[in-house]
Amino acid sequence: MGTERLERPRGRPRDPLIEEAILRAAHQRLAAEGYSRMTIGNVAADAGVTRPTVYRRWSTKHDLVVDALDYRFRAEQAAYPPMDLDAMSAREAVIEAVRRANPRGRSKTGMTLIGNVLAESEHTPGFLDLVREHAVKPRRKRLLDTLRAVQARGGIRTDLDLDLFADLCMGTYFAAYVRTGEDDPNLPARVVNTLWSTMLAA
C-alpha cells in the first residue's frame, strides 16, 4: 500500500497553456492598471480560469508579477531571430541591439508599464525595484552584451563608456515617447547614426 501511494500521480499535470494565459493576462493588467489596482480575480477572469487555479501556481500577487515580467521579456526576445554578428557591420549590430532594447517592447505596453511604475513607486514599496530587475535590466544587459562583443572585435572604441551609451539609447525611447506618444521604428538608426562618430577610434 505504501509503495502504491508513493507511485500514484498527484492530481492532473499542469497545463502550460493555462499558465501562459495567466501570465499574459497578468502582464496586461499590470500595464493597464498598475500593481496596486491589479487583482488576482481580474487576472483569473481575463485568463478564463478561476482564482484557485491562479493561487495553485502563485501564492502571492508579487510572485505572479515577477513571473509575468520574466515571461513577457523571454517571449519578446524569442520572437527575434538570433543576431549573427559575423554577418553584420559594427554599426548594423549596434542599431539592431538598440532596437531590441526598446523598453516599449513588441507588445507596445512597455511605456505604459513604466509610467505606472513611476506613478506607484512612492506608495507601493519595492515595485520599482521589481520592474527594474525583471523588465528593464534584462533588456539593458542584452544591449550591453552586444556592445561588448562589437567592442571586442574592434568595431567601436575600447574606452567607450558602454554603460552611459546604453543609458543614452534607452533614455531616448522615453524622451521620444513623451514628446510624440508614438513608436518611431527609425529611432534606433537615428540615435546610433548621430552618436556613431563619437564611438569610433580617433
Image (cartoon, grey):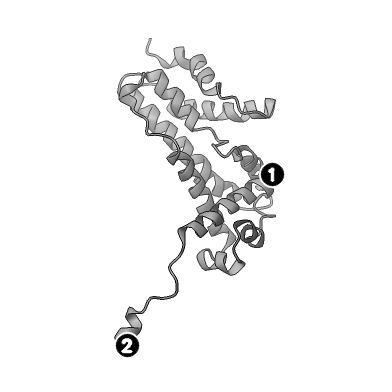
Is mark 1 in CB contact (under 8 Å) with mark 2?
A: no
**Circle 2 residue:** 2
The x and y percentages for residue 171 are 57, 29
Could you say which is closer to the camera, residue 140 or residue 51? 51
* Label 2 Cα crowd, 10 Å radius (few <14 / some 14-19 / many 20+): few
Quadrant housing the N terminus: bottom left
Query: Disc 2 marks which amino acid?
Result: Gly
Mark 1 and mark 2 lie on one chain; the one further toward the N terminus is: 2
The x and y percentages for residue 135 are 52, 43
Label 1 to label 2: alpha-carbon separation: 55 Å
Query: Disc 1 marks which amino acid?
Result: Ala
**Circle 1 residue:** 119
The x and y percentages for residue 127 are 60, 50
Q: Quadrant of residue 2?
A: bottom left
Instruction: Residue at 55%, 57% (x, y): give it.
Output: 64
Instruction: Residue at 35%, 21% (x, y): give it.
Output: 88
Q: Quadrant of residue 38?
A: bottom right
Nearest-to-viewer mark from 1 and 2:
2
Secondary structure at badge 2 equals helix
Instruction: Residue at 56%, 22% (x, y): give it.
Output: 187
Q: Residue furthest bottom?
A: 1
Secondary structure at badge 1 equals helix
**Is 4 drawn above or below residue 117 in the view shown?**
below
